[in-house]
Image (cartoon, coloured by chain):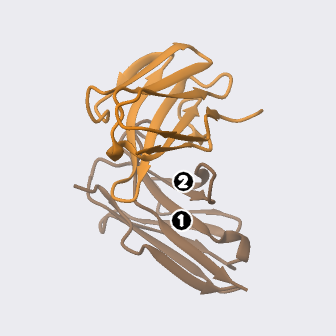
């Protein structure tokens, strides 16, 4: 059973517009959530995280929103740039840190010039 | 900081052969993780170490898989014997603890 789900395998947006990537989780013990970005032939790289005591975390163009009651988080990228084209993974942990991260299957974002 | 270094980048082998994947974590990182990425299952944790000691190997698919960390700067993931269903990208990652993981660039394994 998938504990972290990214239901959209792909997303295409125009440069300058907002990209919204979604993630749902089922395990109510998860208390720490991360987003990773992955380019082809490279490993995932950390993008942004949020603890369950918050509902929003912002870092430049990237904002993560957490809705604990809905067990849902989203990543907003504003404005989107062609260099943001990558696969985005949502991940969650039940230990407040990075041990035993559970990953979603990823969403491939394409930002068109 | 050279990052997490994995070798080889690509491995093609025949069913039944032994495969050894290697990883050098970032110096000073106490945690080391092995992940496997497939289309069907996405990124799944196989095993992780803390201070060279295996902490959780519940993700290791079966006895054909084994992992070791003989010292703080080296780890191996071995598959013996390999099968076509083991074909995947294997990632090693390290972390200093409560910080996000740093991944290597992966080893793409193809078993024919």
- A24 above or below B47? below
Q: Residue at x 27, y 53 (%)?
A: A28
Q: Earlier in the sequence, mark 1 or mark 2?
A: 2
- A10 above or below A34? below
- In the foreground, A33 or A12: A12
In percent of width and height, residue A70 lies at 30, 69
- In the foreground, A82 or B13: B13
Q: Which chain is orange?
A: B
Secondary element type, mark 2: strand
Among the 4 quarters of the image, the one containing residue B15: top left
Among the 4 quarters of the image, the one containing residue A57: bottom right
Secondary element type, mark 1: strand
- Label 1 lies in what chain? A
Q: Residue furthest right?
A: B1
Chain A shade: brown
Q: Pointer 1: residues within 10 angstroms few (<14), some, or many (20+)? A: many
- Label 2 lies in what chain? A
Residue A49, labelled with which disc? 2
> In the displayed structure, does residue B83 sit left or right of residue B97?
left
């Amino acid at each position: 059973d998938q504990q972290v789900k990214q239901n959209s395998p792909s997303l295409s947006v125009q440069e300058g517009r907002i990209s919204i990537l979604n993630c749902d989780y089922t395990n109510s013990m998860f208390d720490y959530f991360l987003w990773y970005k992955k380019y082809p032939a490279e490993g995932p790289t950390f993008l942004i995280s949020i603890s369950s005591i918050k509902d929003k975390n912002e870092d430049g163009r990237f904002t993560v929103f957490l809705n604990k009651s809905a067990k849902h988080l989203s990543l907003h990228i504003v404005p989107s740039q062609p260099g943001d084209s990558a696969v985005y993974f949502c991940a969650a942990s039940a230990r407040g840190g990075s041990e035993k991260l559970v990953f979603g299957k990823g969403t491939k974002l394409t930002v068109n010039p | 900081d050279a990052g997490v270094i994995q070798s080889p980048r690509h491995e093609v082998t025949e069913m039944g052969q032994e495969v050894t994947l290697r990883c050098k974590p970032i110096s000073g990182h106490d945690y080391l993780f092995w992940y496997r990425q497939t289309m069907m299952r996405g990124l799944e944790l196989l095993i992780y170490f803390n201070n060279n000691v295996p902490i959780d190997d519940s993700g290791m698919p079966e006895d054909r898989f084994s992992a070791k960390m003989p010292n703080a700067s080296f780890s191996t993931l071995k598959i013996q014997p390999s099968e076509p269903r083991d074909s995947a990208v294997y990632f090693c990652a390290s972390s200093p603890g409560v910080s996000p993981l740093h991944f290597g660039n992966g080893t793409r394994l193809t078993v024919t």
